[in-house]
Amino acid sequence: MHAIDKLISLANVRGSLDLRCQFQGDWALDHEQQALGVAPYHIVLAGECRVEFPDGQRLPMRAGDILLLPRGARHVMHSPGKTVTPVVPQIVTGGALPIHRIGGASVELDMLCGALHFNRASLLFASLPDYLVIPSGALPANGPLPALVEVIRGEADNDKVGARFLLDALSQALFTLMLRAHLASHGQGTGSLALLGDKRLGRAWQAMLDDPAHEWTIEGLADMASMSRASFMRTFVKVAGVSPWALLTQLRMELAFSLLSHSHLGLSDIAVQVGYQSQAAFSKKFKEVYGEAPGRIRRRI
């Protein structure tokens, strides 16, 4: 399995397309900070707006642009005109999606909004920037991402049988195409993704992804990367931001969460599959990462 496919799989991404925004005139809409593991996204279908972040950054958005907030950052969306106080939109129900409306029936901004739900300790999402923008101008008009947006728009326009289920499933595919477009234009970024962009370190990281339970040593990983032990450690920390052991532990815990969620394996078997011979040692480390014991999380899933 390709390394990024593995990271997507471990992130356990689930999508939901939640509402449609149709606004007119001068408006503003406040979006609170989301819980870790929730990444809102916005697709501008028509019109334009601007997004403001607490640090003062301003981001213009136009028709065809897509914005993803991997860490659920607080933001305020504004009309292009004068700055006004955020308001609560009117909610119109009855179609495939609830419509949040501000102003009259003549729509100036048409936007789809949803969220991605993922493993809160995901190495993949931790490697993404605070906000990720896919501008329409950077994509070929006949490419897969614009085509998928048109399919999503068509389902949102028509309240057909199974539309909500299909919209949620399509939003999961949307993330993969957004990630592909982001990597094509911005490279591998930081953290676990940055390792994959390094030819030598990538070999060692791919091996850890393929077999997290293996008893890896610095010497073995350095040999795989064709580097000295000291050079490997120094370069790995510089690129990934953490040591190989810290990243391996994160990988093992993310895999353990996935096994707790999608398998019927006992805790002792899961411990072995992620490289721990002692269930007690595994449970202690898992609780350090997720704040809860693995058994408690399994009962809650």
Image (spheres, rainbow, N blue to C red):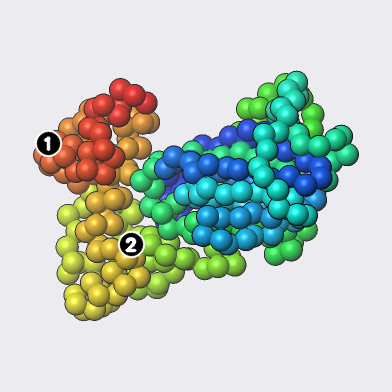
Q: Quadrant of the C terminus?
A: top left
Q: Which mark is residue 64?
A: none
The residue where tag 1 is placed is: 280
Q: Picture coordinates of residue 167 (x, y %)?
A: 66, 33
198 or 125: which is nearer to us? 125
Q: Secondary structure at mark 2?
A: helix
Residue under the point 66% across and 42% down: 86
Reading the image, the residue beneath label 2 is: 205
Task: Spot the residue most to the right.
Answer: 106
Helix or strand or loop: what does disc 1 sit on?
A: helix
Residue 292, given in percent of the width and then of the height, sits at 25, 34
When the figure is inspected, residue 57 is found, relative to residue 228, above or below; the finding is: above
Does residue 181 appear in the picture of this structure? no
Number of numbered discs: 2
Is 285 above or below relative to 221? above
Residue 230 position, x and y percent, is 19, 77
Location of residue 273 (image quadrant):
top left
Of residues 283 and 289, the one nearer the viewer is 289
Using residue 208 as the reference point, say whether residue 27 is left or right of it: right
Residues under labels 1 and 2: Cα distance?
27 Å
Count neighbours of disc 1 (C-alpha within 10 A) and say few if under 14, some if 14 to 19, many if 20 or more.
few
Residue type for callout 1: Ala
Mark 2 surroundings within 10 Å by alpha-carbon count, few (fewer than 14), some (14 through 19), many (20 or more): many
